Image (tube, rainbow, N blue to C red):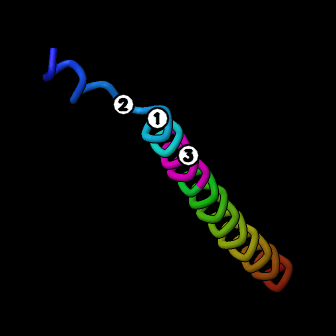
């Protein structure tokens, strides 16, 4: 019985774990969004640069 009580989380512990999980998920989503935006900017710059090159060649 004692070991079961030790394994059971209190309401505060469950709430803290839930908040931590949400924070980690939000941080991961923000990082993914930032990386995607950086990738899009790099691709946009490459497209613009390649477009300038093709215009110069003509």
Q: Which mark is residue 14?
A: 1
Is tag 1's residue or tag 2's residue first in the polypeptide sequence?
2
Residue 25 within the segment the image draws in magenta: yes
Give residue 42's position: percent from left, percent from top: 66, 72
Give residue 8's position: percent from left, percent from top: 31, 25
Q: Residue furthest front?
A: 2
Q: Which mark is residue 19?
A: 3
Give the camera-side residue of 20 and 26. Answer: 20
Q: Which mark is residue 55?
A: none
Q: Is 19 positioned to the left or the right of 33 in the image?
A: left
Which residue is denoted by mark 2 in the rendering?
9
Q: Main secondary structure of the magenta part?
A: helix
Residue depicted at 36% across the width and 30% down the height:
9
SS class, disc 2: loop
Nearest to the eye among marks 2 and 3: give it. 2
Badge 2 vs badge 3, beta-carbon distance below 8 Å: no
SS class, disc 3: helix
Quarter in which the N terminus is drawn? top left
Find the magenta span and give its range: 18-26
Give residue 7's position: percent from left, percent from top: 24, 27
Give the camera-side residue of 36 and 42. Answer: 36
Is tag 3's residue or tag 1's residue first in the polypeptide sequence?
1
Q: Quadrant of residue 4?
A: top left
């Amino acid at each position: 019985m004692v070991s079961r009580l030790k394994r059971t989380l209190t309401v505060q512990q469950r709430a803290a774990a839930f908040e931590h999980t949400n924070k980690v998920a939000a941080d991961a989503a923000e990082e993914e969004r930032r990386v995607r935006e950086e990738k899009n900017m790099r691709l946009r710059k490459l497209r613009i640069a390649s477009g300038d090159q093709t215009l110069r060649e003509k």
